[in-house]
Image: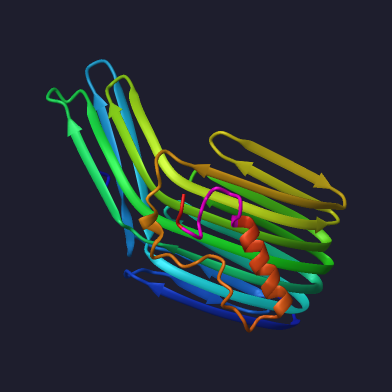
Amino acid sequence: MWQRKNSAKAICIMEQEGFIRRPGDIRLLFVYLFVLLLVFSSHGVGKVGYGIHVTVNDSNASTSWERSHSTTVIEFNSVSSCKGTGNSSKYIKIDGLAGVGLLENTHTNMGRLQEERLLTAGSAVNYILIDENVSNNSNMYSVIINESMPSYLLSIEDIMYRGDGIHKRNSYTNNNDKIMTGFQAKRFSESLAYVARYRNALIMADVTPTKIVEFDGENYSSTIQMESSSDIYSGFEFRSSEEFIEEDYIGSFNLAKRISKEHVFQKRDYEDLDSLPALCSDEYAYLDHSLQAARFFLCRSALNNSNMNLTDGED
């Protein structure tokens, strides 16, 4: 069965470009006094995917199973630079890209803020193949789902703050993997690079009134590399179906972290990636040279030695 605020003096520069391959509802709203709202939303329009909900029962038992996955076909690039003194708020949200997403919420009280940001994301759909079967007596439902929704997200950020206080919380999601960071400080700096890829999946399930036999084979990967300095609170958390890390630091701490996670069930189909842009582009030549070099180094470092082969398409 288918169930198919206050005053601030600042210099803020932003360049953005987007290419929407299918009709969709994508809202971009930028308001400065150090306020940045970036919202990707899709109310069903322009979304591509599937949803299955099935219940199998007999006179003695009943079992339900469901699976859904979808994306919005887009390409998006944003470069921003902010420097000034005052109060600021920033909210960034990206979701609906085959399970890949980002959420950031930052607020600063009166102080000096300098920030450089590169954000790029995209998704496509190659195919979604679904083969369903029901036994003659209707006591077993079987399905094979073969999907290819190549999607990516790259976020690179350099920030420095001195003032009355900053509160910053970020979360990065790639399907079952989630990374969260949190900071509170009066003196704060952070350099962070995060890259996520989702490629394809093969899902198989047999559902009977008494049990479910399921295989989930997915190809996706994430890498985060960060360095931070905070004088009040620093927090880091990583969650997946197999691992869990939670760290809290109260006081003045410098952190340096690099975490990579890759899910592989078969030889990957690199044709999925042919149409996606290079993640470590050096095309932003108008930026300050030192910041441009730092961004490029962070990006390449985050990708190198991760076994993800994101930039060259080779095993």
Residue at figure coordinates x 39%, y 69% from the top left: 25
In-image side of 6 versus 40 (left or right): right
Q: Relative to 291, does residue 253 appear above or below in the rendering?
A: above
118 to the left or right of 110: left
Look at the picture and state if 66 lies above or below 180. above
Q: Is residue 236 magenta?
A: no
Majority SS type along the magenta span: loop
Q: Residue at x 49, y 41 (%)?
A: 263
Residue 265: horizontal and vertical position, in percent?
A: 42, 38
The location of residue 186, given as percent across then percent down, is: 84, 63
Which quarter of the rendered picture does the N terminus lie within? Answer: top left
Residue 309 is covered by the magenta coloring: yes
Residue 161 x, y percent position in the rendering: 80, 68
**Which residue is nearer to you in this view: 1 or 75?**
75
Q: Residue furthest top?
A: 60
First to last magenta residue range: 303-312
Q: 69 left or right of 297?
A: left
* Most foreground residue, 152 or 282: 282
Q: Residue at x 51, y 48 (%)?
A: 221
Instruction: In the rendered view, tell whether residue 258 sits above or below residue 203.
Output: below
Q: Is 314 positioned to the left or the right of 70 in the image?
A: right
In terms of depth relative to the viewer, which is nearer, 136 or 109?
136
**Which residue is outermost to the front?**
314
Relative vertical location of residue 283 with respect to residue 168 in this rendering, above or below: below
Residue 150 figure quarter: bottom left
152 or 30, which is in the foreground?
Answer: 152
